[in-house]
Amino acid sequence: MFNRELKKGSTELLILALLEARPRHGYEICKLIESRSGGRLSFRVGSLYPILCRLEDKGLIVGRWVEKPGERRRRFYRLTAPGRATLAQQRSVWDDFISAVNQVVGGEHA
Amino acid sequence: MPDWEQFVRKNLRLTSVEPERETEIVQELAQQIDDAYRDALRRSLSEQEAARFAGRQVTDWNALARELASSPRGAVPPLRRWEDRAGSAAGKQMRWSWIAGAGRDVLFALRMMRKNPSFTMIAVLTLALGIGANSAIFSVVNGVMLRPLPYPDAGRLVLMLENSRNQARLETFSVSWQDYLDWRQQQRSFDAMGVFRNEIFILTGADQPERLSGAFAAADVFRAAAIRPLLGRAFTPEEDQPGASQVVTLSERLWRNRFNAAPGIVGRAITLDGANYTVIGVMPDGMRLPSRLTDLWVPLGLYVNRMPSSRDNHPGLMVVARLKHHVTHEQARAEMDTIAQRLARQFPDTNSMTGVEMTTLYESVVSNIRGVLLALLAAVGFVLLIACVNLANMTLARGEARLREFAVRSALGAARSRLVRQLLTESLLLSGLGAALGVALAWLALKALVSSHPATIPRLDQIRIDLQVLGFSCLVALLVALVFGLWPALRITSRKGMVSLADLTPTASRRSRLRPILVMAEVGLAMVLLVGASLMMRTFSSLTRIELGFRPEHVVTMRLNLPARNYSQAQWEAFYRGLLARVAALPGVQAEGISSLTPLGGGGAESGIFPEGTPLDPNNPGPGCTHGTISGGYFTAMGIELLKGRTFTDRDSADSPRVIVVDEAAARLFWPGQDPIGRRVAFEFRGQTIQDPQPQWREVVGVVRSVRHYDLTTPNSRVQVYVPYGQPAIWFETPPTMSLMVRTGMESSSLVSSVRREVTAIDPALPVFAIHTMTDYVDGALEQPRLSMAVMIVFGGLALVLAAVGIYGVLSYSVSQRTREIGVRMALGASRADVLRLILRQGAMVSLAGVAIGAAVSLAAMRLIRDLLYGVSPTDALTYLVVPLVLLAVALTATLIPARRATKIDPLRALRHE
């Protein structure tokens, strides 16, 4: 629905935001992105996973194998302190960006 | 459910990622794809659709791999990546590959071996000797002891004899005919129970008359052996009965050698002892009852009527039987004991003391040689251990010299496991080469052994290098590589062993406390082997100095067997009287005689003997005697000393009083302190029962020296008596095979041909066989001890050399490491003599400690070979005095060379290294 470039630039933000509330595993992140965007955004495992790796490399999130009772072993990712800071910063940058874009695009109504 | 891990592994081609990281990635991707799959199932998609949905979670595997590879986490260091790619034959496509890595290790190891040829040569040679000696001894053990006998399910075959249950003196003898019949009828433990007896046959008709060793055998002998004939058939139960037709079964060997493997042999007639026999079958080489030398078998039925009627007579019968499948040896033994006890109650006169002696066929074949083989196996294991210690030492020393190389590689990112693998590859390669050369050496040694035809090693033809032996050698090589490779490798690459590059100055001196301990162990092991060799040598020397009772030098013997059907007793006597006269007339003959027994060569017969005046009590049958039928000249020809009285003359004939000559042991036993001449003894009985024995008394006319008759080391358990051939002992069925003994100053071959001419002049159909000098028989009796001694000397010598090399290696290494220290000492005023003493003391300490350890181990170990020793105690003082001296002398020599080098150190130059 949205083009690739747009999606790619925002994915890191999406992931960090989804991990803000609590740790989640990979496929759960895919599903949440899809359901919360009302199906307009969707990711496959193959494209999300390298981004998770990259975020982990940067130290923004950290993954851990967890075995919950009654469930299979999964790798859960949680936000680190630098991740939380980055999320806050990106969120404000994003907000600024959106409002700036809106100002330009919807100029007549402002 | 699909295996997503495998799915990921198949599609994702990761390069330059550490294996651990790769596993992690694969697992997580699989987990996520699996989540997608389950999710799809929950949304009530079909399994197939769900799988397709999950499979589409990754669309571009190559892009994914690229992205993952750009992550710094788990990436292979650049240098290693280059190494891997360089070593990988398949280049980029190949992932981390063990095989390629191993190939690279081998190449590197080969380069190291080429760079250091003297190390390589010494190592490979040491290993070749160690592994070769082990392979050779193992192939003998394998052929003689481990390989099953050539019969199907051979473990179920047993041999049976009878024994005297008199506990005081356990004697084994052949089975009585009546006892065999009762056993066979009463037993329930065996599928088949057959009886056989050795027989000698003379084959005539073609070229030279030929003496063949044969056997008469019951049909059950072949049933028990479970061997199918190669051609024709074996015997039937009908042929066990009287009136069987004159048939014969040939051995494969006889059929091939004598009848050129004629396919039409079955049905042909051959002439044995002058009678016609029809060949009904050919038995394959595997049929070795009574022995592997048996040429032919004739049916039992031809002999049944001639069996002795007395149960007390034991006419050389042996019983072979095959256990039923569900019956154990113990059960069978118990049953046979019960039967024997029943017979003892039933026939108290003859059987009250008779038991059954049951052994497995295997046991009867190997029991004589087992002790020797196990001792040699242990000895050769020690040699290998010494070789290993030496190599471990060399590897350690070289490893220390290569510390710089390891430090550099470690600094460049090589893991410890890689360095260990490299070192292990080098030792595996060395031991592999050593094993290959060793097997070649073993092959040569075995060829020499087998071609020397030692008669004392059973199943000689089974000894060869086969897959089992090769497998053994490979296993030994592998173990050796682990022992001398892995352990030093772990040591060298350990955190303690590794040094940083900065520490590696050329003068850095690192003293290892371990290596002297290794040398100590080596000296100890060498000591054990040398003690063994020395005891064997002392044994052999005792054996050669045994009082034989006869003088074997310059005596030629040959055997003659007159067929009973052609010779009556009178004709038999006449033949020998004529022959002795003709031989006496030959030039060069100093003395001549005939005898039914040959000392150390067999023959003779045994029975109980009673001096007049003692009761003939079957429960106390008195001493046994070995009796021989001889001519008067026998004693002179053999050099047996006549101590008292006279020998036999031509006047001792059937018409004159019956006479006997006894040996000194009999005289001492029966008439201690009295004159035996004129006394009477009996060993022949015409009666059938003990109530009416009808002893045949003979008067003692002479006393001679006792002779070692059966073997060198067993003191005679029976006394020896001799009767004149004019009054021969009562014989069973056929007259005894006689040996002609000629003492001569001549060369034996020309004498033999002139004797043969004289025999042919009397009876052209008579073969002369078993032509030997008496020295041959003595040598034969010495063969096994000589062989064990020779092998032990070789092993001992090998151990000595290896130990010397070990001491030399450790001390020269130590001297080179202590160059600076010695330089300082000399600069501070130490004389050359002081330095020499310093190094010598170090060598002496190690050697003395080794000798002490070795002495302790030897004292324990030599107890185990007590049975192989003769005339020397396992704690022989001379051995324990001389061996350490020899060992110390060799050790000192090995020490002297590095010690002299130490004294030549120039203090100035040594210090300038600083």
Image (spheres, rainbow, N blue to C red):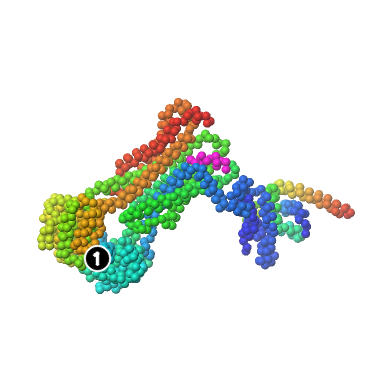
Quarter occupied by residue B754: bottom left
Residue at the location (22% across, 60% down)?
B560
- Tell me the subunit letter for badge 1: B
Q: Secondary structure at mark 1?
A: loop
Image: B409 above or below B716: above
Residue B786: image location, x then y, percent: 31, 49
Residue B535 in the figure: left or right of residue A54: left
Q: Amino acid at mark 1?
A: Ser
Q: Nearer the viewer, residue B663 or B727?
A: B727
Q: Which residues are magenta?
A: B397-410
Q: Nearer the viewer, residue A55 or B359?
A: B359
Residue at the location (15% across, 62% down)?
B574
**Mainly helix, strand or loop, the magenta region?**
helix
Residue B855: image location, x then y, percent: 36, 42
Residue B872 is one of the magenta-drawn residues: no
Residue at the location (45% across, 32% down)?
B902
Quarter occupied by residue B241: bottom left
Q: Nearer the viewer, residue B30 or B640?
A: B640
